[in-house]
Image (cartoon, rainbow, N blue to C red):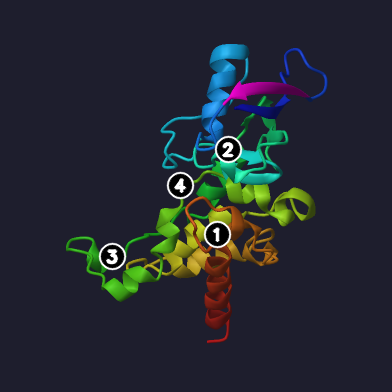
Amino acid sequence: MKVTLKVYRFNPETDKEPHYDTFNVEAEPTDRVLDCLNKIRWQQDTTLSFRMSCAHGICGSDGLTINSQSALACQKLVKDYDYTKKILIEPLRYFDVVKDLIVDFKPFFERIKSINPQETQSIAKDNIEKERNQTIKERSQFDDALKCILCGCCYGACPVMIGEDREFIGPAAILREQRYLFDSRIADAQERMQIMQKPHGVWGCKSYYKCTVVCPKNIKVTEAILKTKKKITQEQTK
C-alpha cells in the first residue's frame, strides 16, 4: 500500500525558510516510521537528513515529532497513525534545527551535565574502599530513572520548555538528578538539591505530564519530578 509522509525540510546552506516535501512510499501497516524514512532516503531523496543508530529503541537517536507528538521513529509503526492521511514528520520541538530532521542537542547535554556538583565527592567516602552495598528496596527508589536513554522526546513535548521558559533545566535533567538524590550511596545530596533550586530548576516544572505521555521507555517522569520536589521540601523543613 502507499503511505504519504509530509516531511519538514530545512538546509541552512540553501534555504531561507523551512518548507515541507511530500513523499509516497510503499509500506505495510507493521512497518516502522523509520523504515519509511529510510525508503525515502534510499529511493527518492538522498539529501533527506535524520539521525538513527540502533533502530531498536535503545540508543534514542531518532527522536522526532510525528503528527505533532514526540516519539522515536524506530518504535512507531505506520498503523499507529491514520495512514489514510498524510503522516506529518518534523524535528523535535524546542531544539534548533541543524538540517531537516536533525536538531542541535548541545543545550540538552549541557543541562544534563549541569546537575552534577563540581567540587564534591559523589560517593560516600567510607564506601570507596569496599563494596557499596544497597538493598533491593533502596535501589527501587530510582530504578525507573535508570531506563532513560536521553532521547530528548520529553524536551520536545514539554510546554514549559517550548513556550514558557526556554531556560528550564528540563524533565530529563531532573530525572537524572532524581536518580542520584534517591541513591543511598550518594554523599552530595545537599549540593544536588541546591542545584535543583536554582532559577529555571526543578520548580519550573508545572506538571503537565506531557513528558510522561511521550516517554518511549514508559518512565513516570512527572512522578519522579514530584518526588524530587517533595524530598527538597522535606529537607528544607528539617
Give the amino acid type for the residue marked by disc 4 in the picture: Ile
Give the label on residue 185, or none: none
Please name the residue that numbered disc 1 is placed on. Answer: 174
**Secondary structure category for the residue under label 3:** helix
Give the amino acid type for the residue marked by disc 1 in the picture: Ile
What crowding class fits label 2: few (fewer than 14 Cα within 10 Å), some (14-19), or many (20 or more)?
Answer: many
* Marks 1 and 4, the one that precedes in the sequence: 4
Q: Residue at x 67, y 42 (%)?
A: 82
As measured in the structure, the alpha-carbon distance from the residue carrying label 3 to the one carrying label 2 is 52 Å
Q: Position of residue 80 (x, y in %)?
A: 59, 45
Residue 14 magenta:
no
- Disc 1 versus disc 4: nearer the observer: 4
Please name the residue that numbered disc 4 is placed on. Answer: 149
**Secondary structure category for the residue under label 1:** helix
Image: magenta residue range: 20-26
Q: How many marks?
A: 4
- Pick the quarter of the image with the N terminus: top right
Please name the residue that numbered disc 2 is placed on. Answer: 78
What crowding class fits label 3: few (fewer than 14 Cα within 10 Å), some (14-19), or many (20 or more)?
Answer: few
- Disc 3 versus disc 2: nearer the observer: 2
Give the amino acid type for the residue marked by disc 2 in the picture: Val
As measured in the structure, the alpha-carbon distance from the residue carrying label 1 to the one carrying label 4 is 14 Å
Asked if the residues shown at circle 1 and circle 4 are in contact, with their CB atoms under 8 angstroms apart, the answer is no
* Marks 3 and 4, the one that precedes in the sequence: 3
238 in relation to 42, above or below: below
Asked if the residues shown at circle 1 and circle 3 are in contact, with their CB atoms under 8 angstroms apart, the answer is no
Please name the residue that numbered disc 3 is placed on. Answer: 125
* Marks 3 and 2, the one that precedes in the sequence: 2
* Marks 2 and 1, the one that precedes in the sequence: 2
